[in-house]
Amino acid sequence: MVLRIEDTDASKKTDEFVDAILEPLKWLGIDWDEGPFFQSDRAELHKAAVQQLVDNGSAYFCDLTREQIDAKSDEAGLPAGYHGWSRDSQVADGPGVVVRFRAPDEGVTVFDDVIRGRVEVAHENVEDFVIRRGDGSPTFLIANAVDDHDMSISHVIRGEDLLNTVPKVLMLWEALGYGEPPIYAHLPLLVNEKRKKLSKRRDDVALGEFASKGYLP
Protein backbone atom coordinates (compact mmCIF):
# COMPACT_ATOMS: atom_id res chain seq x y z
CA MET A 1 0.00 0.00 0.00
CA VAL A 2 1.33 3.38 -1.08
CA LEU A 3 0.10 6.45 0.80
CA ARG A 4 -0.01 9.41 -1.54
CA ILE A 5 -1.35 12.82 -0.58
CA GLU A 6 -2.96 14.25 -3.71
CA ASP A 7 -2.42 17.95 -3.14
CA THR A 8 -2.16 19.35 -6.65
CA ASP A 9 -4.66 21.91 -5.35
CA ALA A 10 -2.32 24.21 -3.40
CA SER A 11 -5.11 25.17 -0.96
CA LYS A 12 -5.09 21.63 0.40
CA LYS A 13 -1.41 21.56 1.31
CA THR A 14 -1.94 22.30 5.00
CA ASP A 15 -1.01 20.39 8.15
CA GLU A 16 -4.71 20.14 9.01
CA PHE A 17 -5.50 18.56 5.65
CA VAL A 18 -2.68 16.02 5.96
CA ASP A 19 -3.48 15.15 9.59
CA ALA A 20 -7.10 14.49 8.56
CA ILE A 21 -5.73 11.68 6.37
CA LEU A 22 -2.93 10.29 8.54
CA GLU A 23 -4.54 10.27 11.98
CA PRO A 24 -7.74 8.35 11.10
CA LEU A 25 -5.66 5.70 9.28
CA LYS A 26 -3.53 5.28 12.40
CA TRP A 27 -6.71 5.14 14.53
CA LEU A 28 -8.06 2.34 12.33
CA GLY A 29 -4.78 0.45 12.52
CA ILE A 30 -4.23 0.72 8.77
CA ASP A 31 -0.51 0.97 8.06
CA TRP A 32 1.18 1.71 4.76
CA ASP A 33 4.34 0.35 3.17
CA GLU A 34 5.57 3.47 1.37
CA GLY A 35 5.01 7.19 1.88
CA PRO A 36 3.42 9.47 2.58
CA PHE A 37 4.35 10.98 -0.77
CA PHE A 38 3.07 14.42 -1.72
CA GLN A 39 2.09 15.06 -5.32
CA SER A 40 3.11 18.69 -4.89
CA ASP A 41 6.70 17.51 -4.37
CA ARG A 42 6.58 15.68 -7.69
CA ALA A 43 5.44 18.63 -9.80
CA GLU A 44 8.56 18.58 -11.98
CA LEU A 45 7.74 15.04 -13.12
CA HIS A 46 4.20 16.14 -13.97
CA LYS A 47 5.42 19.21 -15.85
CA ALA A 48 7.88 17.08 -17.82
CA ALA A 49 5.00 14.81 -18.88
CA VAL A 50 2.96 17.84 -19.95
CA GLN A 51 5.89 19.05 -22.04
CA GLN A 52 6.27 15.60 -23.59
CA LEU A 53 2.62 15.69 -24.66
CA VAL A 54 3.00 19.19 -26.11
CA ASP A 55 6.14 18.16 -27.97
CA ASN A 56 4.53 15.08 -29.55
CA GLY A 57 1.38 16.96 -30.56
CA SER A 58 -0.92 15.31 -28.01
CA ALA A 59 -1.51 18.60 -26.15
CA TYR A 60 -1.56 22.31 -26.92
CA PHE A 61 -1.75 25.76 -25.33
CA CYS A 62 -5.07 27.56 -24.87
CA ASP A 63 -5.55 31.15 -23.69
CA LEU A 64 -9.36 31.30 -23.71
CA THR A 65 -11.23 32.20 -20.53
CA ARG A 66 -14.40 30.39 -19.49
CA GLU A 67 -16.42 33.42 -20.58
CA GLN A 68 -14.80 33.39 -24.03
CA ILE A 69 -15.42 29.66 -24.39
CA ASP A 70 -19.10 30.06 -23.47
CA ALA A 71 -19.45 32.96 -25.90
CA LYS A 72 -17.92 30.92 -28.74
CA SER A 73 -20.26 28.01 -28.01
CA ASP A 74 -23.27 30.33 -28.08
CA GLU A 75 -22.12 32.00 -31.27
CA ALA A 76 -21.62 28.66 -33.00
CA GLY A 77 -24.92 27.28 -31.72
CA LEU A 78 -23.13 24.43 -29.93
CA PRO A 79 -23.80 22.91 -26.50
CA ALA A 80 -22.00 24.53 -23.59
CA GLY A 81 -18.40 23.41 -23.24
CA TYR A 82 -15.05 23.58 -24.96
CA HIS A 83 -15.02 22.56 -28.62
CA GLY A 84 -11.34 22.59 -29.50
CA TRP A 85 -11.26 26.29 -30.27
CA SER A 86 -7.48 26.65 -29.74
CA ARG A 87 -6.38 23.41 -31.36
CA ASP A 88 -4.83 25.05 -34.41
CA SER A 89 -4.39 28.61 -33.14
CA GLN A 90 -0.68 28.27 -32.34
CA VAL A 91 -1.14 29.98 -28.96
CA ALA A 92 2.16 30.79 -27.26
CA ASP A 93 2.76 29.78 -23.66
CA GLY A 94 2.56 32.47 -21.01
CA PRO A 95 0.80 33.66 -17.86
CA GLY A 96 -2.77 32.42 -17.65
CA VAL A 97 -2.32 30.00 -20.55
CA VAL A 98 -3.47 26.44 -19.91
CA VAL A 99 -2.43 23.22 -21.61
CA ARG A 100 -5.18 21.01 -22.99
CA PHE A 101 -4.93 17.37 -24.02
CA ARG A 102 -6.06 16.77 -27.59
CA ALA A 103 -8.71 14.06 -27.21
CA PRO A 104 -8.98 11.73 -30.23
CA ASP A 105 -11.76 12.70 -32.64
CA GLU A 106 -12.84 9.12 -33.26
CA GLY A 107 -12.89 5.76 -31.53
CA VAL A 108 -13.59 4.68 -27.97
CA THR A 109 -11.68 4.13 -24.75
CA VAL A 110 -12.63 0.83 -23.10
CA PHE A 111 -11.72 -0.58 -19.71
CA ASP A 112 -12.99 -3.38 -17.47
CA ASP A 113 -13.87 -2.16 -13.99
CA VAL A 114 -13.84 -4.89 -11.34
CA ILE A 115 -17.21 -3.69 -9.98
CA ARG A 116 -18.90 -1.81 -12.81
CA GLY A 117 -17.88 -4.20 -15.58
CA ARG A 118 -17.04 -3.10 -19.11
CA VAL A 119 -17.04 0.67 -19.58
CA GLU A 120 -16.90 2.30 -23.01
CA VAL A 121 -16.58 6.02 -23.65
CA ALA A 122 -16.77 7.45 -27.16
CA HIS A 123 -14.03 9.99 -27.83
CA GLU A 124 -16.49 12.32 -29.50
CA ASN A 125 -18.02 12.86 -26.05
CA VAL A 126 -14.73 13.89 -24.42
CA GLU A 127 -13.67 17.52 -24.76
CA ASP A 128 -10.02 18.55 -24.84
CA PHE A 129 -9.40 18.67 -21.10
CA VAL A 130 -6.95 20.80 -19.13
CA ILE A 131 -3.80 19.07 -17.86
CA ARG A 132 -1.94 22.21 -16.74
CA ARG A 133 -3.62 25.21 -15.15
CA GLY A 134 -2.97 28.82 -16.05
CA ASP A 135 -0.68 29.19 -13.02
CA GLY A 136 1.54 26.39 -14.32
CA SER A 137 0.38 23.72 -11.87
CA PRO A 138 -0.58 20.25 -13.12
CA THR A 139 -4.14 18.98 -12.73
CA PHE A 140 -5.28 15.84 -10.93
CA LEU A 141 -5.53 13.92 -14.21
CA ILE A 142 -1.92 14.24 -15.40
CA ALA A 143 -0.52 13.97 -11.87
CA ASN A 144 -2.32 10.69 -11.28
CA ALA A 145 -1.33 9.21 -14.62
CA VAL A 146 2.34 10.04 -14.00
CA ASP A 147 2.39 8.97 -10.35
CA ASP A 148 0.45 5.73 -10.86
CA HIS A 149 2.96 4.74 -13.53
CA ASP A 150 6.03 5.91 -11.62
CA MET A 151 4.93 4.18 -8.40
CA SER A 152 3.93 0.95 -10.20
CA ILE A 153 0.38 1.16 -8.87
CA SER A 154 -1.39 -2.11 -9.71
CA HIS A 155 -4.89 -1.47 -8.33
CA VAL A 156 -6.94 1.69 -7.85
CA ILE A 157 -10.02 1.26 -5.60
CA ARG A 158 -12.17 4.35 -5.06
CA GLY A 159 -15.66 5.86 -5.29
CA GLU A 160 -17.74 5.67 -8.45
CA ASP A 161 -17.88 9.47 -8.62
CA LEU A 162 -14.38 9.26 -10.14
CA LEU A 163 -15.35 6.70 -12.78
CA ASN A 164 -15.66 9.42 -15.43
CA THR A 165 -12.01 10.43 -14.97
CA VAL A 166 -10.65 7.02 -15.95
CA PRO A 167 -11.02 7.38 -19.76
CA LYS A 168 -9.11 10.68 -19.62
CA VAL A 169 -6.32 9.17 -17.53
CA LEU A 170 -6.13 6.18 -19.89
CA MET A 171 -5.84 8.53 -22.88
CA LEU A 172 -2.92 10.25 -21.15
CA TRP A 173 -1.46 6.87 -20.22
CA GLU A 174 -1.45 5.77 -23.86
CA ALA A 175 -0.14 9.08 -25.19
CA LEU A 176 2.76 8.91 -22.72
CA GLY A 177 3.59 5.35 -23.77
CA TYR A 178 3.17 3.88 -20.30
CA GLY A 179 1.99 0.40 -21.31
CA GLU A 180 -0.43 -1.62 -19.15
CA PRO A 181 -2.57 0.59 -16.88
CA PRO A 182 -3.72 -0.28 -13.34
CA ILE A 183 -6.81 -2.35 -12.59
CA TYR A 184 -9.72 -0.15 -11.48
CA ALA A 185 -12.55 -0.88 -9.05
CA HIS A 186 -15.14 1.84 -8.43
CA LEU A 187 -17.24 1.38 -5.30
CA PRO A 188 -20.83 2.59 -4.88
CA LEU A 189 -20.99 5.81 -2.87
CA LEU A 190 -22.09 5.90 0.77
CA VAL A 191 -25.40 7.66 1.27
CA ASN A 192 -27.24 9.20 4.22
CA GLU A 193 -30.61 8.17 5.65
CA LYS A 194 -32.33 10.04 2.81
CA ARG A 195 -30.40 8.01 0.23
CA LYS A 196 -28.43 11.06 -0.83
CA LYS A 197 -24.67 11.06 -1.40
CA LEU A 198 -22.83 12.04 1.77
CA SER A 199 -21.97 15.73 1.70
CA LYS A 200 -19.46 17.69 3.76
CA ARG A 201 -22.08 20.43 4.06
CA ARG A 202 -24.66 18.33 5.91
CA ASP A 203 -23.23 14.94 6.95
CA ASP A 204 -20.42 13.47 9.02
CA VAL A 205 -17.96 12.37 6.36
CA ALA A 206 -14.61 12.64 8.14
CA LEU A 207 -13.36 9.55 9.97
CA GLY A 208 -12.06 11.81 12.72
CA GLU A 209 -15.64 12.82 13.53
CA PHE A 210 -16.64 9.21 14.16
CA ALA A 211 -13.65 8.77 16.46
CA SER A 212 -14.58 11.89 18.43
CA LYS A 213 -18.14 10.59 18.88
CA GLY A 214 -16.89 7.39 20.46
CA TYR A 215 -17.15 4.94 17.59
CA LEU A 216 -14.68 2.07 17.86
CA PRO A 217 -12.21 1.48 15.04
Image (cartoon, rainbow, N blue to C red):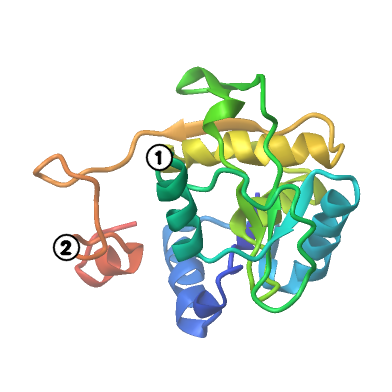
Q: Circle 2 — which element?
A: loop
The three-letter amino acid code for the residue at tag 2 is Arg
Above or below for 112 versus 94: above
Which numbered tag is attached to residue 151? none
Marks 2 & 1, CB-CB < 8 Å contact:
no
Above or below for 11 versus 71: below
Q: Circle 1 — which element?
A: loop
Residue holding disc 1: 79
Among the 4 quarters of the image, the one containing residue 7? bottom right
Residue located at (23% from left, 60% from top): 215
Q: Earlier in the sequence, mark 2 or mark 1?
A: 1
Q: Residue furthest front?
A: 75
The 10 Å Cα crowd at callout 2, few under 14, some 14 to 19, many 20 or more, is few
Taking 96 as reference, is 186 left or right?
left
In depth, the one of 56 and 41 nearer the eye is 56
Residue 180 in sight in this render: yes
Residue located at (50% from left, 79% from top): 11
In depth, the one of 71 and 208 nearer the eye is 71
Taking 39 as reference, is 164 left or right?
left
Counting from the top left corner in percent of width and height, residue 57 is at 85, 45
Counting the numbered discs, the total is 2
The 10 Å Cα crowd at callout 1, few under 14, some 14 to 19, many 20 or more, is few
Q: Residue furthest left?
A: 194
Residue holding disc 2: 202
As measured in the structure, the alpha-carbon distance from the residue carrying label 2 to the one carrying label 1 is: 33 Å
Counting from the top left corner in percent of width and height, residue 133 is at 63, 67
Counting from the top left corner in percent of width and height, residue 59 is at 77, 49
Q: Residue furthest bottom?
A: 15
Quadrant (top left, top right, bottom left, bottom right) of the C terminus: bottom left
Residue located at (81% from left, 38% from top): 175
Residue 154 in sight in this render: no
The three-letter amino acid code for the residue at tag 1 is Pro
